[in-house]
Image (spheres, rainbow, N blue to C red):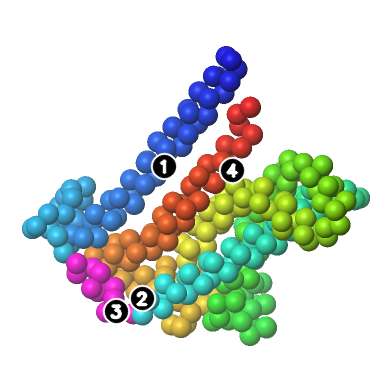
């Protein structure tokens, strides 16, 4: 009884700490949102105050919608992020299943090789990546970004999902083989549903760097038709003058998809983070 009570208290403490950390992390988002509805003078005069009848202004959102094709930038970012996450989760889960399920010579070495991307930033290879994209004719295409972000997210996906898939019961998988299920059926119908918390964790951890990235869109897809939201927002930042109303409005709109994803996957995300922490 005492052990069960202690376990529940630890779980509540872990969830409480996560909620506190979440509120602290969301405070800058709150500041950006409230200032996006203020006049320029009010932003600098009272940055932490809520907008009122005197300070309220929609000039930032009006500028964002008039200057540049913001909806196209949003669409490009959404396509790149969703497709990249799909490939990261699919290929990462398949590689993790192979590493966790099949024992072969070099299994550990292969796992370390796939995890090297966590320790070696992909930006180190920017010049080589640009040369490859030029040679294949993929510069100024969304596919260039999708391929790079997929390669960027796979190491973390393999590292996390491998550990979770090792916890899936061998009896369940062997029962499926006895019933005549193929390996692909076992993977998609038996294993993947059991590692959904880990999949949600991988999706959230990979979405934020992809959605907010400026480096690779600037290098690989700077054309007007392929600009992402982050790159398109740079039009409001000048060398001598910055339109802070438009910048804050663009950032507020860019934050929405991340918040929606967090709300959708928050339960699975917390389960994925805390899995195994409390016995």
Residues in magenta, as a range: 58-68
C-beta proximity under 8 Å, tags 3 and 1? no
Label 3, label 2: how far apart the Cα atoms are: 8 Å
Q: Is residue 219 above or below residue 44?
A: below
The disc at residue 40 is none
Residue under pointer 1: 22
Counting other residues with Cα less than 10 Å from the Cα at mark 1, is it few (<14), some (14-19), or many (20 or more)?
Answer: few
Residue under pointer 3: 67
* Mark nearer the N terminus (3 vs 1): 1
Going by the image, does 102 lie left or right of 262? right
Label 1, label 2: how far apart the Cα atoms are: 29 Å
Residue 160 location in percent, x, y? Answer: 66, 47
Label 3, label 1: how far apart the Cα atoms are: 34 Å
Residue 72 location in percent, x, y? Answer: 41, 78
* Mark nearer the N terminus (2 vs 4): 2
Which label lies toward us, 1 or 4? 4
Magenta segment, prevailing SS (helix, strand or loop): helix
Residue under pointer 4: 272
The disc at residue 70 is 2
Q: Is residue 150 magenta?
A: no
Q: Is residue 73 above or below residue 106?
A: below
Which label lies toward us, 3 or 1? 1
Q: Residue at x 34, y 64 (%)?
A: 253
Quarter of the view holding residue 236: bottom left
Count of marks, rendered view: 4
Counting other residues with Cα less than 10 Å from the Cα at mark 2, is it few (<14), some (14-19), or many (20 or more)?
Answer: some
């Amino acid at each position: 009884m005492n052990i069960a009570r202690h376990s529940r208290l630890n779980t509540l403490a872990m969830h409480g700490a996560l909620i506190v950390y979440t509120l602290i992390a969301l405070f800058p988002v709150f500041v950006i949102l409230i200032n996006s509805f203020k006049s320029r003078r009010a932003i600098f005069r009272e940055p932490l105050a809520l907008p009122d009848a005197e300070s309220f202004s929609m000039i930032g959102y009006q500028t964002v919608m008039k200057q540049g094709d913001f909806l196209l930038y949003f669409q490009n970012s959404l396509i790149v992020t969703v497709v990249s996450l799909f490939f990261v989760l699919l290929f990462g889960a398949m590689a993790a299943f192979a590493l966790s399920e099949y024992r072969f010579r070099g299994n550990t070495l292969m796992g370390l090789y796939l995890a090297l991307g966590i320790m070696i930033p992909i930006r180190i290879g920017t010049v080589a990546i640009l040369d490859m994209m030029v040679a294949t004719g993929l510069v100024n295409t969304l596919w260039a970004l999708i391929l790079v972000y997929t390669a960027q997210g796979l190491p973390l996906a393999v590292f996390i999902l491998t550990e979770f898939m090792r916890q899936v019961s061998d009896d369940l998988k062997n029962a499926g083989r006895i019933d005549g299920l193929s390996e692909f059926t076992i993977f998609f119908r038996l294993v993947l549903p059991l590692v959904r918390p880990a999949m949600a964790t991988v999706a959230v951890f990979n979405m934020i760097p992809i959605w907010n990235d400026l480096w690779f869109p600037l290098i690989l897809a700077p054309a007007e038709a392929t600009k992402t939201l982050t790159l398109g927002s740079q039009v409001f930042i000048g060398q001598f003058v910055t339109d802070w109303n438009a910048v804050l409005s663009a950032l507020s709109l860019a934050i929405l998809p991340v918040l929606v994803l967090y709300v959708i996957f928050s339960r699975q995300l917390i389960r994925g983070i805390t899995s195994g922490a409390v016995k």
